[in-house]
Amino acid sequence: MNKNRVELFSDGVFAIVLTLLVLNLKVPSSHGIAAVLSIGPALAVHATVFGLVGVMWIAHHGALARVDRISQRALLFNLLALFWVTLLPFAAENAADRQAEPLGPSMLAFCYGAFMLSFLAMRLSMHSTIDDHAAMKAWRRTRQRIARSLVVWNFACAVLAWWWIWAGYAGPIATVAAFLALRSPPEAEQDFDQVAFAGSDRPSSGTP
């Protein structure tokens, strides 16, 4: 299947999810500082989930940036990954409206873990130019180990949220922080290419 069609469809889903998030915000009945205090928790949840969806989109975009072949299996895993994304507005609304209930935070962590698991399966079902880059194979394996650890971390936080609701937020927030600390595949590939080019231009020890 054409990669552009997959990107357009996926980008459309992410855009709709972000739109649904803001539609969950309700105009407060009070005014002034009281209004800010009443809507503060909902705004905090909105900002958290908006950042979460943004990181999901960046990861999705980075994975497809160097893909040249997409299999039928990859399409199915892509749909599964997007399914978990579409549940985030529901989880965010629960977290904002029922602040003492664990369902919303638990769903946030679970959906992110499930997205990462589906995303990994999708990436392994596709062929990318990174796969043919000898210097990036070890880099890719390291990224996969980190991703698997984040999957386990978010699933664990989803369970712990039923005893301590803040664990549900800790999972996604820590994952976003870890993701932002890592370089994207295109950037890393460019760095490896520059190092290889510099090495090829360096004179040998026997050159005067």
Image (cartoon, helix red, strand yellow):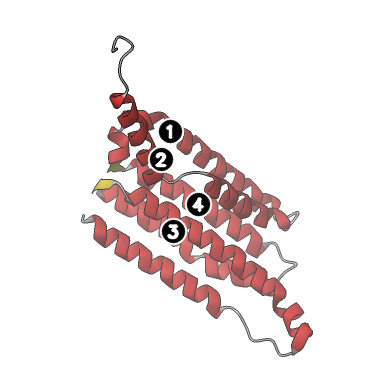
Q: x, y (%) of residue 56?
A: 47, 56
Label 3 vs label 4, nearer the camera: 3
Residue at the spot 59% in from the left edge and 59% down from the top edge = 108
The residue mark sitting in front, 1 or 4, is: 1
Residue 112: x and y in percent read: 53, 54
Q: Is residue 99 left or right of residue 132?
A: right
Q: Please say if the residues under marks 2 and 1 sit with CB atoms less than 8 Å apart.
A: yes
**Disc marking residue 139:** 1
Please give left or right for residue 33 compared with residue 96 in the image.
Answer: right
In the image, residue 136 above or below residue 163: above
CA distance separating discs 2 and 4? 26 Å
Q: Earlier in the sequence, mark 2 or mark 1?
A: 1
Question: Badge 4 is on which residue?
Answer: 114
Task: Kindly tell me whether residue 146 is visible in this rendering.
Answer: yes
**The C terminus lies in quadrant:** top left
Discs 2/1, front: 2
Residue 33: image tag: none
Alpha-carbon span between mark 3 and mark 4: 15 Å
What kind of residue is marked 1? Answer: Trp
Q: Which residue is most to the front? A: 208
Q: Quadrant of the N terminus?
A: bottom left
The residues bearing labels 2 and 3 have C-alpha atoms spaced at a distance of: 18 Å
| Mark with earlier residue (3, 1) | 3
Q: Does dot 3 land on a helix, a strand or a loop?
A: helix
Q: Residue shown at 33%/51% (left/top)?
A: 64
Q: Quadrant of residue 79?
A: bottom left
Query: Badge 1: few (under 14), some or many (20 or more) residues near its Cα, within 10 Å?
Result: some
Q: Nearer the viewer, mark 2 or mark 3?
A: 2
Residue 57: numbered disc? 3
Image vertical order of residue 134 relative to residue 126, above or below: above
